[in-house]
Amino acid sequence: MTHDVVLIPGDGIGPEITEAMRRVVEATGVSITWHVEQAGAGVMDEYGTPLPQRVLDAVSKVGVAIKGPITTPVGTGFRSVNVALRHAFNLYACVRPCLSLPGDGSRYHDVDLVIFRENTEDLYAGIEFDPGAPEVAALAGLVDQAGLRPFRADSAISIKPISEAGSRAIAEAAFEYAERCGRRKVTAVHKANIMKATDGLFLRTVREVASEHPSIAFEDKIVDAACMGLVQDPSDFDVLVLPNLYGDIVSDLCAGLVGGLGMAPGANIGTSCAIFEATHGSAPDIAGQDIANPTAEILSAAMMLEHLGEAEAAEQIRAAVRATLAEGAVVTADVRRALTGSAEGAAGTRAYADAV
Ligand code: ATP
Ligand code: MG
């Protein structure tokens, strides 16, 4: 059987790491028709937008995509192309496993946790007002009337919408995953002691979903304490469920527990589409030099193969990555540096992919 997959190479290191990913996927023998679609800074001149309609059409027709990171050119009306894609397909669940691999260069060795980040709400909704905007003045008036603490009229404002439905959707995704995959515990991460309305609603909703899944242990942690706990003893965590912004930050923290951004894969799951992508951004500082670590993108492809029902090929890829890192002879500069303090003797993106 042949699978159709939309491949969006993206910007910065995107083309290099997606090419490496594609070669690794093809080596499994799984038959895939790649529908390559360009998005990002490179298509601005041709289409006048970093996210052409043809990309949206292709993803909506095929239903499965894997992408490299996309840079959002300034002055396009897009806050973020990545966020726009998540909104266009209501990709409400961002799933990011963080699993220690022997030889990943991290100081931790038994990390095995999975992040469920709400992907559509929170401060990422992009509802913002600059100082002087009439909305700021209006809100200041309302706050005054309510007798609440006034805020300065020269403030900028970002709105943080968190809904019950959005919180329920991500919580159900986390608990269903925990049940399906034999996980023991879900931890809700929040700041409900301060943001009683928004994070309070998130926490109450996750708690409610927890009560519908009695076989999975549940706890909640305040985000600051969770960060401390994660670096102190990551084995205390299993599945984490977070609103969007904390999910973004804690994802990078957890990537650091397993060897860095080059190691952390991810999936954006919606009701009708799924888009797979590494946790990291376009890393313009190392683009085009054949030094980026493609592991995060390759492991994202393993998640995609699982989603496509190709569990055996997914496991083949994970085993190949594990073996290559454990051997340690052919690894990229980030891993080499973490292991030895110097990038000397590191392999390039292509050579590493070949080894895998
Ligand atoms: P964005 O705003 O898109 O997140 P960014 O400037 O934050 O972009 P990231 O890609 O998130 O950049 O990464 C931060 C740094 O981590 C990069 O500058 C790069 O040095 C390193 N990095 C990220 N991804 C990789 C990778 N795959 N391999 C090696 N190093 C990486
Ligand atoms: Mg970043």
Image (spheres, rainbow, N blue to C red):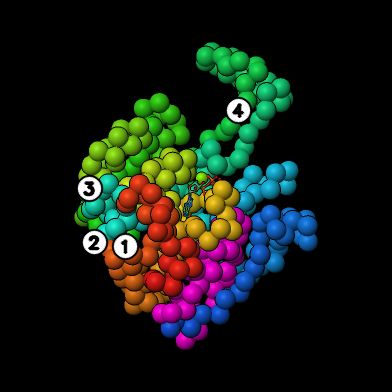
Question: x, y percentage for residue 88?
Answer: 61, 56
Disc 3, SS: helix
Residue at image x 62%, y 71%?
36
Amino acid type, callout 2? Gly
Callout 1 environment at 10 Å: few (<14), some (14 to 19), or many (20+)?
A: some
Please indicate, yes or no, whether residue 77 appears anywhere in the rendered image.
no
Tag 2 residue: 182
The image shows residue 210, relative to residue 140, as above or below, that is: below
| Comes first in the chain, label 4 or label 3 | 4
- How far apart are the two marked residues, 4 and 2, measured between alpha carbons? 42 Å
- Residue nearest the observer in this picture, 9 or 80: 9
The image shows residue 101, relative to residue 319, as above or below, that is: above
- Residue nearest the observer in this picture, 124 or 110: 110
Tag 3 residue: 235
| Left or right: 191 as drawn, with respect to 288 | left
| Comes first in the chain, label 4 or label 1 | 4
Please indicate, yes or no, whether residue 328 appears anywhere in the rendered image.
yes
Tag 1 residue: 328
- Residue nearest the observer in this picture, 306 or 22: 22
| Image mark for residue 157 | 4
Where is the C terminus found, in terms of image quarters? bottom left
- Check whether the beta carbons of the residues at disc 4 and disc 3 lie within 8 A of each other: no
Question: x, y percentage for residue 240?
Answer: 33, 47
